[in-house]
Image: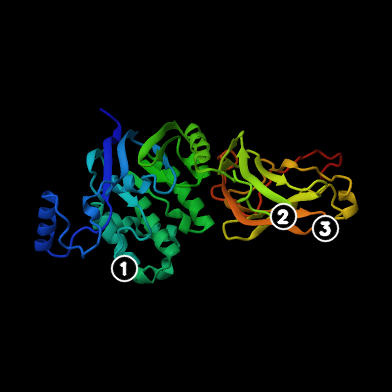
């Protein structure tokens, strides 16, 4: 007997852009009949373009997706925003139907696709637990047996008899995940909702999903946290523009995902010197983020991050220095750095290194295991020998640092702090004995 519990065959999902429906059946029929005859939409105003008869009215959220999942397997689903991850889970959850192809599921499914999935806002937390259990086909007695465990896991005992419309998003997620994970589903589908919860709760959720998988149930987990994906899921799927780009061992798939960051740049350049940022003394040529030999906006936490600044020096004998400011996703300063020859900001030190006209490249390297897993932006500047700004470009590039999973076998979730360097530690025996 096959152990396959999810089988996806040539699955495709298309969405139509623009307005769907006019509000009345008679108008819908008139619009349809006009389209069949190749006539303009009769509901449009004079001069308004008829987008309904133009090519490109359909986008494919998924296209010809094929894979299978075995019982007890934890499968990670990764990809950029808009890749089709949520659409795939919605089809598996029977929230929406595919345009073509088949998605066969064997077993009871619990889904956590967005904050408050399956909750009625006017019902209390307790009533929603019973409602969700009934939807999953459980008896009232079965739900009662799980009730205390769910409430304890969600840590909202004080608010369990409060209507959930008064819950915060974090409380919503706590209860929703607790319900989905504890009502004995055979298949658990989790989208990127755990990011709403706090650090301790995310760690607890990942641990619970590991227990669910080890108990012989199936988990499909969508996340942008590569560390969690790596630790929870032995196998992963990489979706790109609705199609499967990679499927297999999680570390290999994550590596391909990070490599695909080269497709979204990590570099900005100006071919025309007249239009480049700067002045009559110096102008930028290019700024790029390089890791593992390629320009990319996605780097692994255990790889160097190399910032390259190319610029034209337009004056003989100029004294120039490149600067960068690193900011986190909240636009807070992480650090600042400048390529001065000494910590002493004396102009006399600079006078020994005037540069002739030409094209130059300045390189700054963040070592591996230095930056935390986070989204960053960089500001780039160039100053002259008097420390006067010649160029100052804010948020010129952004990049993301991703966990590899190697250092997080016991610790789940993002590490605290702005940086997380891998420092040298040692333990040595001392001659003195213990009393």
Secondary structure under the numbered disc 1 in the rendered image: loop
User: Is residue 93 visible to the viewer in this orientation of the structure?
Assistant: no
Q: Nearer the viewer, residue 242 or 216?
A: 242
Check disc 2 and report its element: helix, strand or loop: strand
**Among the two numbered marks 1 and 3 on one chain, the one whose residue lies closer to the N terminus:** 1
Residue at which label 1 appears: 121
Which numbered disc, 2 or 1, marks the residue that appears first in the sequence? Answer: 1
Q: Position of residue 218 (x, y in %)?
A: 35, 40
Q: Are marks 1 and 3 in contact (CB under 8 Å)?
A: no
Please give left or right for residue 337 compared with residue 52 in the image: right
Measured as percent of width and height from the top left, residue 270 is found at 60, 46
| Crowd class of label 3 (few under 14; some 14 to 19; many from 20; radius 10 Å) | few
Residue sticking out furthest to the right: 348
Q: Nearer the viewer, residue 307 or 92?
A: 307
Q: How far apart are the alpha carbons under marks 1 and 3?
A: 63 Å
- Disc 3 target residue: 386
Q: Is residue 121 above or below residue 134?
A: below
Placement of 121 over or under 235, stated as above or below: below
Q: Which residue does the numbered mark 2 point to in the structure image?
A: 336
Task: Give how far apart the Cα atoms at labels 2 and 3 are.
Answer: 18 Å
């Amino acid at each position: 007997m096959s152990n396959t519990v999810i089988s996806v065959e040539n699955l495709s999902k298309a969405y139509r852009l623009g307005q769907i429906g006019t509000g009345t059946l008679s108008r819908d029929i008139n619009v349809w009949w006009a389209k069949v005859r190749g006539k303009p939409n009769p509901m449009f105003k004079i001069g308004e373009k008829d987008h309904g008869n133009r090519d490109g009215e359909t986008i494919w959220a998924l296209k010809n997706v094929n894979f299978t999942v075995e019982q007890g397997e934890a499968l990670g689903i990764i990809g950029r925003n808009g890749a089709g991850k949520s659409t795939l889970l919605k089809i598996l959850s029977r929230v929406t139907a595919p345009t073509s192809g088949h998605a066969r599921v064997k077993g009871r499914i619990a889904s956590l696709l967005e904050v408050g999935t399956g909750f009625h806002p006017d019902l209390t937390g307790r009533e929603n637990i019973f409602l969700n259990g009934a939807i999953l086909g459980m008896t009232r007695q079965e739900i009662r047996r799980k009730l205390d465990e769910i409430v304890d896991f969600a840590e909202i005992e004080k608010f369990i008899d409060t209507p959930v419309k008064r819950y915060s998003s974090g409380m919503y997620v706590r209860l929703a995940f607790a319900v989905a994970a504890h009502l004995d589903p055979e298949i658990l589908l989790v989208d990127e909702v755990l990011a709403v919860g706090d650090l301790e709760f995310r760690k607890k959720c990942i641990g619970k999903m590991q227990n669910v998988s080890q108990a012989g149930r199936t988990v499909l987990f969508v996340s942008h946290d590569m560390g969690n994906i790596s630790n929870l899921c032995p196998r992963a799927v990489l979706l790109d523009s609705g199609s499967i780009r990679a499927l297999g061992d999680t570390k290999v798939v994550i590596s391909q995902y990070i490599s695909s960051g080269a497709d979204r740049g990590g570099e900005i350049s100006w071919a025309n010197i007249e239009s480049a940022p700067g002045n009559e003394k110096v102008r930028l040529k290019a700024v790029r983020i390089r890791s593992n030999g390629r320009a990319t906006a996605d780097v692994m936490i255990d790889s160097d991050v190399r910032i390259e600044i190319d610029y034209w020096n337009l004056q003989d004998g100029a004294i120039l220095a490149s600067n960068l400011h690193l900011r986190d996703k909240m636009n807070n300063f992480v650090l600042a750095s400048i390529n001065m020859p000494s910590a002493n900001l004396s102009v006399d030190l600079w006078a020994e290194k005037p540069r002739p006209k030409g094209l130059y490249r300045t390189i700054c390297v963040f070592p591996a295991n230095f930056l935390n897993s986070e989204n960053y932006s960089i500001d780039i500047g160039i100053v002259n020998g008097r420390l006067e700004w010649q160029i100052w470009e804010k948020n010129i590039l952004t990049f993301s640092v991703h966990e590899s999973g190697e250092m997080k076998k016991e610790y789940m979730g993002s590490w605290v702090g702005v940086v997380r360097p891998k420092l040298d530690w040692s333990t040595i025996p001392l001659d003195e004995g213990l009393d």
